[in-house]
Image: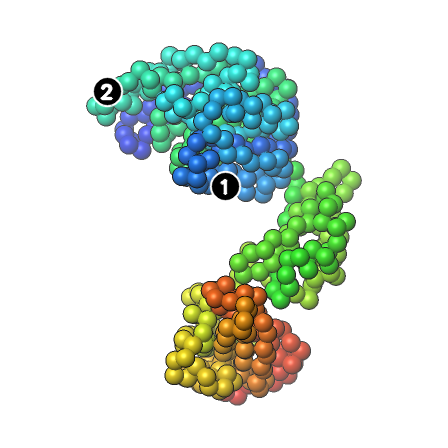
Amino acid sequence: MIAAVKFATSPRAPNRPCPYTPGMKTAKPQARPIRSAVLLAIGSELTAGETRDTNSAELAHLLAEAGVDIGWISALPDRLETVTAAVGGALAEADVVITTGGLGPTPDDLTREAIARVCGEEPAVDPELGAWLRHLFDRRGVPFSETNLKQAWLIASSTAIPNDRGTAPGWWVDRPDGRVIVALPGPPAEMRAMWQEWVLPRLEKRGLGRERLTRTFRLTGIGESTVADRLGEKLLRAPNPIVATYARADAVDVRISAVAEPRRPAAALMARAEAQVLAAVGDYVWGHDDETWALVLGRELAEKGWDAALVEVGTGGAAARLLGETAWLRASRSIGAGEPGSELPLAGLARQAGRSAGAWIGLAVRAVESGEDTRVELAAVGPWGVSEATQTAFLGGAEGRRRAGIAAVAFLHEILRTALAARLASTSTPTGRQ
């Protein structure tokens, strides 16, 4: 008995469904859950740097969130031997191999040929796919070139993946040991729709991934190398949970990924790793997961019923750009180095900013070139009084100014979580703004 899977009605001709109905294979492969994957992006435009591979990043994120281990990601040129070797090597290591690109009608589109070689099968034009392709051209009044029939190829172990947004169907290839090859087109809109509507549901039926928990701690005031030293090699090299550090534009992230084991739930593994991370670097944590500075500071200010105004000197508005449009930031102003007011005492600038905006807190930051680095001066005036600090930001120029902006928001965060501010918020009600 053959189960039918139909192409959806094309959005370019809403009243005329595509006529092709690919048949599902009757031979069932050995049952194999999908625990690991390799992603191959195919196209010389990728390896030449003319196009960025966004498909692999998107698929890797989705698979990792589902608890699938990503073995590796590769970009490959349009060379048959290279693609064949990569598909064969990936198939030996992963439960599913996913390719994107190389499914067009031209001679340099070689993904089908490579997969056929790996499987030891001969591709041939599927009559129904061929008729569907001719229909696409006929309804637009475009001459049909016979070279397009390459997009109607199938091999015995493949099933066509419907593509309602283009002319290149994908391939789903079942291997005898239960492994799967999925070939998808390169255009992201086509790839994404085929993945969500057709491929993902079938992978989930196979048993996609394992229970996985992830947690990210966002740190400031400490470099990535120092974070790694504090965490230690044993923790960073442990296979489960995986603990890794990442230097981001606005923070150093420590990400924990815990996968359930037969006698060890993911939650238990996560809790132990979290305790180890916090014991090592907890004093530097300002946020979690995908939290931003604007979100975290806004939450802390809301708890106290406060808001803020900002003035920057010599930073080019780096702190304001980091915060973006936020309701709690009542006003922000940037003064260039050497402009009138740039040399005034910083606490006075902070007080003036708060009063002018009618905000509870006035925050000021000044960046000054200091040799190869940047001296960062900070001041905040609020219900607790005046807080001031000076620190050195690594590097000068634009990078130093960017780091000065981070220093400013981190300074405000530290003030808001100090014992003095917490005591003030919990035991008394401020009577006025700046």
Q: Residues within 10 Å of mark 1 (few under 14, many from 20)?
A: few
- Please state which of residues 127 and 217 is positioned toward the viewer in this rendering: 217
User: Looking at the picture, how far across and down is residue 194, in whole percent?
Assistant: 44, 32
Category of crowding for the residue at label 2, using alpha-carbon neighbours closer than 10 angstroms: few (below 14), some (14–19), many (at least 20): few
Give the residue type at disc 1: Glu
Q: Which residue occupies the foreground of this view, 199 or 276?
A: 276
Question: Could you say which is closer to the camera, residue 27 or residue 235?
Answer: 235
Q: Residue 268 carries which label?
A: none
Residue 244, position as x, y percentages in the image:
66, 50
Vertical position of residue 61 compared to residue 110: above or below:
below
Residue 305 in view (yes/no): no
Q: Where is residue 306 in the image (x, y as percent from the top left)?
A: 52, 77
| 258 displayed left or right of 144 | right
Q: Which of marks 2 and 1 is nearer the N terminus?
A: 1
Identify the residue shown where x is 57% and y is 60%.
Answer: 251
| Residue drawn 44% across the image and 31% down it | 43
Q: Name the residue under label 2.
A: 143
Read off the residue under disc 1: 58
Vertically, is 64 above or below 10? below
Residue 2 percent across, percent down from the top left = 49, 15
Identify the residue at image location x=51%, y=67%: 396
